Image (cartoon, grey):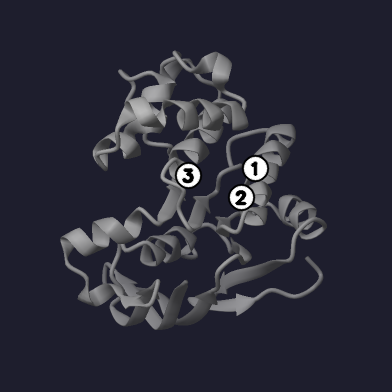
Amino acid sequence: MIELENVGYSYGGGELLSDVSVCLSPGSFHFLTGPSGAGKTTLMKLCYGALRPTSGQVRAFDADMAGLDRDAMALLRRRIGVVHQDCRFLDHLSLTDNVALPLIVSGHDMAQERENLDELMNWVGLSQRAGALPPELSGGERQRAALARAVILSPDMVLADEPTGNVDWEMSQRLLQLLIELNRMGKTVLIASHDLALIRAAKSQVQARVLRIANRQLQLAGADL
């Protein structure tokens, strides 16, 4: 589904990632770990084309990202749902309108999508907060809304960058369960996280591989996690 082959990325004159090779196969579940500044967010951006590698090749759905024009890249990104660290909501729009933005931008008929949108809001437990503005939401509500927006177009893959970084353990577990449900529905899931307790909780429920960035390279973490 997404494959990085000998990928390197340099920033500001220094090398952040070097000789990274990994294949995220359909239906797989991966965690990405590593210390702050190791390059987790950079690696995820390489996976969905927000950054281009300075060396090596990134392929997504059998296409070399380097050869895609703007329109082809836009279509490809609809197949990859991204949960960003900062959520990136528009504060003047309601929660429902923020979640629905990908549908609107891609030209969907909102009248036809209303039932699906309502079901999705119920799935993430936010039906009662549908009319709230983003500044009125708690950290957990914002993260669940970000996940809903990431999957509104029914992508094949979900990339979540530290989705539990600003919430308590109970909410972390709830978010994890939503991501596990997506994986059981056939979605490929990649979660960047430094929370080892969360990773252990996931590994008791799904067959999750743990990747660690260390010394600019990607390694398969040991079974001790």
Residue 186: horizontal and vertical position, in percent?
60, 59
Quadrant of res 80: bottom left
| On screen, residue 14 above or below 51 | below
What residue is shown at x 48% (from left), y 17% (from top)?
A: 130
What residue is shown at x 70% (from left), y 43% (from top)?
A: 177
What residue is shown at x 74% (from left), y 33% (from top)?
A: 170
Q: Indicate left or right for 100 with 167 as reference.
A: left
Quadrant of res 25: bottom right
Q: Are marks 2 and 3 in contact (CB under 8 Å)?
A: yes
| On screen, residue 102 above or below 212 | above
Mark identifier at residue 151: 3
Which of pointers 3 and 1 lies earlier in the amino acid sequence? 3
Compare residues 162 and 108 and report the one nearer the observer: 108
- The residue singled out by tag 2 in the image is 182
Amino acid type at mark 3: Val
Quadrant assignment for the C terminus: bottom right
Quadrant of res 173: top right
Amino acid type at mark 2: Leu
* CA distance separating discs 2 and 1: 6 Å
SS of the residue under disc 2: helix
Residue 62: horizontal and vertical position, in percent?
38, 77
Residue 117: horizontal and vertical position, in percent?
46, 30
Q: Are marks 3 and 1 in contact (CB under 8 Å)?
A: no
Q: Residues within 10 Å of mark 3 (few under 14, many from 20)?
A: many
* CA distance separating discs 2 and 3: 9 Å
- The residue singled out by tag 1 in the image is 178
What residue is shown at x 41% (from left), y 66% (from top)?
A: 47
Residue 154: horizontal and vertical position, in percent?
46, 48
Q: Are marks 2 and 1 in contact (CB under 8 Å)?
A: yes
